[in-house]
Image (tube, grey):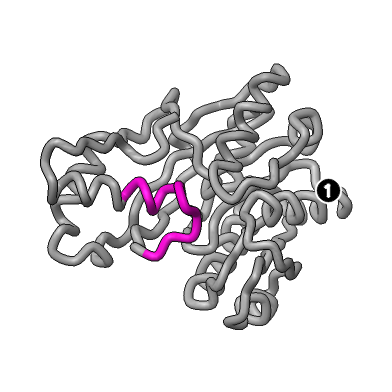
Amino acid sequence: MAIPAHEERAHIAAAVAAVQVAAGHPALQGEAVEIVVVADACSDGTAACAAAQGAHTLSLPHRNVGRARQAGAELLLARGARWLAFTDADTLVADDWLAAQLGLGAQAVCGCVWVRDWSAHGALAERLARAFESEYVPVDGHCHIHGANLGMTADAYRLAGGFAPLCTSEDVALVHALQAAGVAVAFSAQPRVWTSARVDARAPAGFGEALRSMSRALVLPGRGAGAPRAV
């Protein structure tokens, strides 16, 4: 599985540790799981921190999440991966995350996200949490796409042409390419991950920016903002 990371020293060790627990889930019956952290334009020791935690690392200079995810996927494919799973560096996956993805028996899986801490939004934290939870309902058959909770077979990934070199929404583009190629995509709430609500989000139009839009709408009524990444 692959984790793209840009200046993520503060989060990467916990992210890798959570994936390592998921990789050892009994339902996987001891199947080998390789973890690749793609340190993209990092100057804070992200790669060293990930390596110390036991992950394989790859360093890139691009500052482009699409290229980072693609590089991680290509490395895993070259090492014989049959299933590609993706999450983010500020995200903690559930203990049964990989088992839940594989257990669906689908060619590709889009999961939901849960937020573990709203405190970065200060006085608006409680109101933002309520607004998010009222609009974003994690159920089977949802319509959300998150790079923090995504998986697919190696064959499906190749069929769709892999991640496009986009600085944002690379996950959405890939899922749309999967669907256009006739790949069966399961939109499930069973694989669970907890991500951050930080205000210094890395993707310019990703989950963090959607939360900021929701926050602004709370301060300026009338500027509605829907649930993050409801695509």
Image quarter hosting the C terminus: top left
Residue 155 percent location from the top left of the image: 80, 32
Up the image or down, 17 lies above or below 105; here it is: below
In the image, 125 versus 41, the foreground residue is 41
Membership of 139 in magenta stretch: no
Question: Relative to 152, is 168 on the left or the right?
Answer: left
Q: Quadrant of residue 4?
A: bottom right
Q: How many numbered discs, if any?
A: 1
Please provide the residue range marked out in magenta: 200-211
Amino acid type at circle 1 is: Leu
Which residue is at a point 55% across and 71% down the rendered structure image? 12
Which residue is at a point 75% across and 35% down the rendered structure image? 157
Which residue is at a point 58% across and 56% down the rendered structure image? 22
Residue 75 percent location from the top left of the image: 82, 55
Question: Relative to 204, is 37 on the left or the right?
Answer: right
Q: Quadrant of residue 198?
A: bottom left
Looking at the rendered structure, the secondary structure element under dot 1 is: helix
In the image, 145 versus 106, the foreground residue is 145
Membership of 210 in magenta stretch: yes
* Pointer 1 local density, CA inside 10 Å: few below 14, some 14–19, many at least 20: some
Up the image or down, 186 lies above or below 75; here it is: above
Which residue is at a point 45% across and 47% down the rendered structure image? 205
- Label 1 belongs to which residue? 77
